[in-house]
Image (spheres, rainbow, N blue to C red):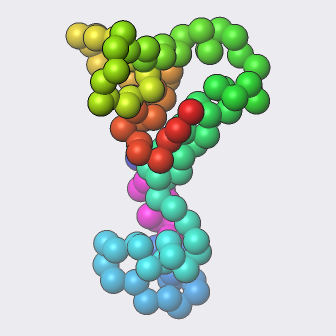
Amino acid sequence: MIERVQRKFLRHAAFKLNIFCPPHDYTPIQRIFSLESLADRRHSANLTFLSNLLSSKIDSPESLSRVSFNVPSRRTRSSVPFNIPFSSSNYYLNSPIIRLMRIANTDPSFSL
């Protein structure tokens, strides 16, 4: 939904500034205005929040206590930093802290 609002804004800005834009392709306008897609911004905001939480820039002991670190009992090749518990519902898997840990586990640029 919010992506649609951003595309509508980009289309209107291109019209007002007389910038040619092929139909349904807003990447040239995004480059001109130096805008990331909202999904990319949300992804980087999640990683920034988690790294700030772990480095104590955000003082929230309750949130920090919900972060589950992966501590293997022996050396493995797996390098995922967080342990995500099994859940049979999407409601729990999409909760904020679990989502942050899942994003950090899948992003190769994230490091502790």
Compared with 91, 102 (above or below) is below
Compare residues 42 and 101 and report the one nearer the observer: 101
Q: Is residue 84 visible?
A: no
Which residue sits at x=59%, y=9%? 65
Compared with 97, 43 (above or below) is below
Q: Position of residue 40 (x, y in %)?
A: 47, 52
Compared with 68, 55 (above or below) is below
Query: What's the magenta region?
Result: 2-10
Q: Residue 75 is drawn in which quadrant?
A: top left
Q: Residue 58 is drawn in which quadrant?
A: top right
Which residue sits at x=62%, y=15%? 64
Compared with 70, 55 (above or below) is below
Image check: 48 left or right of 5? right
Q: Position of residue 104 (x, y in %)?
A: 45, 34
Q: Position of residue 100 (x, y in %)?
A: 48, 29
Quadrant occupied by the C terminus? top right
Q: Residue 99 is drawn in which quadrant?
A: top left
Asked if residue 77 is among those painted magenta in the image, a careful observer would answer no
Q: Is residue 85 visible?
A: yes
Q: Position of residue 54 (x, y in %)?
A: 64, 26
Which residue sits at x=41%, y=56%? 4
Which residue sits at x=55%, y=66%? 35
- Secondary structure mostly seen in the magenta stretch: helix
Image check: 100 left or right of 75? right
Count of residue discs: 0
**Which residue is the extreme one toward the left?**
88
Compare residues 75 and 34 and report the one nearer the observer: 75
